[in-house]
Image: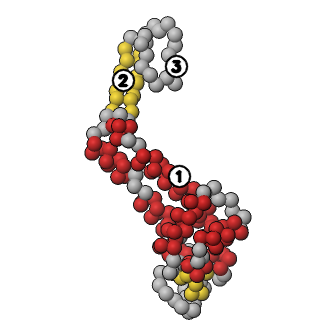
Amino acid sequence: MWQTNSKTFSDLYPSFENFKADLNLYGYTFSLTEDELKIIFVMLVTRYGDSEIISFRNEYRWKMRLQYIIFTYGKEWALKKQIQEQILNLTDEDLLNSSIQITNRADNPATEPSTKELEELKYINSQVAQGTKRDKLSILILKYSSIMSQANESFIDRFQELFSKFPLGDKPIWYYRNEE
């Protein structure tokens, strides 16, 4: 039997300070900044603020599950957000001249070329250097594809299992789970 106790996310966490205090209460070490935790809090309030929690028999276990999801997937979400910001902050010029691929061949070089060099060599017999340049449409497509909404949605959807899909009041839900 799983039941709801008619508490909502906003009832448990009326402010960010309450949310943050609970995060430190159970001993998880979060490698997220306070700003990232505030964003997570705002996303949770926005999506689930008025949703009733499914209390796995008590609030303590529910809060532990909430923290587990943040601990497990929060850093991944934050890194995706940082990468998106870096891509969006690149200038069009940076994206126009995006890469160069260099292939060198030397039959009798005086010195062995380093494989770590990214510059063209002057003393080789032949060299193929292929540069790629993007057009304006490719740049817009790249920036558009890096928009964070998909990462935000996939992260916030992970919390869906913690909330009732329909209001229950104080009535318990009885169900049978076939574990075959």
Residue at image mark 1: 79
Which of disc 3 and disc 2 is earlier in sequence?
3
Marking on residue 129 = 2
| Percent of width and height locating residue 121 | 43, 16
| Percent of width and height locating residue 73 | 56, 60
- Which element carries disc 1, helix, strand or loop? helix
Instruction: Kindly tell me whether residue 53 is visible in this rendering.
Output: no
Residue name at image x 32 percent, y 44 percent: 139
As measured in the structure, the alpha-carbon distance from the residue carrying label 1 to the one carrying label 3 is 33 Å
Instruction: Kindly tell me whether residue 91 is visible in this rendering.
Output: yes
Marking on residue 114 = 3
Residue name at image x 61 percent, y 79 percent: 12
Query: Which amino acid, by three-letter code, is at mark 1?
Result: Leu
Q: Quadrant of the N terminus?
A: bottom right
How many marks do you count on the picture?
3
| In this rendering, the label closer to the viewer, 1 or 3 | 1
Determine whether, in the image, residue 71 is placed left or right of residue 118: right
